[in-house]
Image (cartoon, helix red, strand yellow):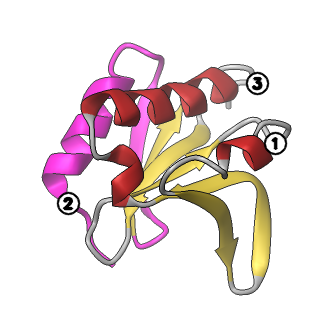
Amino acid sequence: MAVDEAFAAKVRQLLKGKGRIVEKRMFGGVAFMLNGNMCCAVNGEDGRRLMLRVDPGRAPALAKRKGARPMRMKGRTFDGYLWIEAPGTATPKALQGWVEEAVTFVLTLKAK
């Protein structure tokens, strides 16, 4: 897996000012930690897949949106996590909406 650095820069910019952001190499790409909690990550074959941490109660409805699907790894589905493929983040407005969805949820979590 890879990271599309231009795409990661867009995500980084959207996270600016939201809290303490730390980047870590995880999930075959780069993960963005917000106040010590996993918020989102950029990875995938083309380096433009977005992984989001969202409200588990909203995840099923969000997974029905364009480019979105539940996060599954090694046969396990992770509640409250979604993959968003490139078609779902093709416009700046769409990408911003997804990142805001993750930030809104992660800010409800206790900072680490």
Residue wearing tag 2:
4
What is the residue that sits farthest to the right in this orientation? 57
Question: The N terminus lies in which quarter of the figure?
Answer: bottom left
Amino acid at circle 3: Lys
Amino acid at pointer 1: Pro
How far apart are the two marked residues, 3 and 2, measured between alpha carbons?
A: 30 Å
Q: Is residue 26 left or right of residue 12?
A: right
N-term-proximal mark, 1 vs 3: 1
Q: How far apart are the alpha carbons under marks 1 and 3?
A: 16 Å
In the rendering, at what x and y percent does residue 5 appear?
Answer: 16, 54
Picture quadrant of residue 59 = top right
Checking the image for residue 56, the label placed there is 1
Labels 1 and 2: the sequence-earlier one: 2
Residue 97 rendering spot, x and y as whole percentages:
46, 28
In this view, the mark in front (1 or 3): 1
Amino acid beneath label 2: Asp
Name the mark nearer the viewer: 3 or 2.
Answer: 2
Q: Which residue is mark 3?
A: 110
Q: Are there few (<14), some (14-19), or many (20+) residues within 10 Å of tag 3?
A: few
Q: Are marks 1 and 2 in contact (CB under 8 Å)?
A: no
- From the top left corner, tell me how far across and down residue 52 is, in percent: 56, 47
- Circle 1 residues within 10 Å: few <14, some 14–19, many ≥20: some
Vertical comparison of 72 with 60: above or below:
below
Q: Position of residue 78 (x, y in %)?
A: 76, 62
Please check the rendered image and state whether residue 2 is part of the magenta-colored stretch, yes or no: yes
For image coordinates 48% across by 56% down, the residue present is: 67
Secondary structure state at the residue bearing disc 3: loop
Q: Secondary structure at mark 2?
A: loop
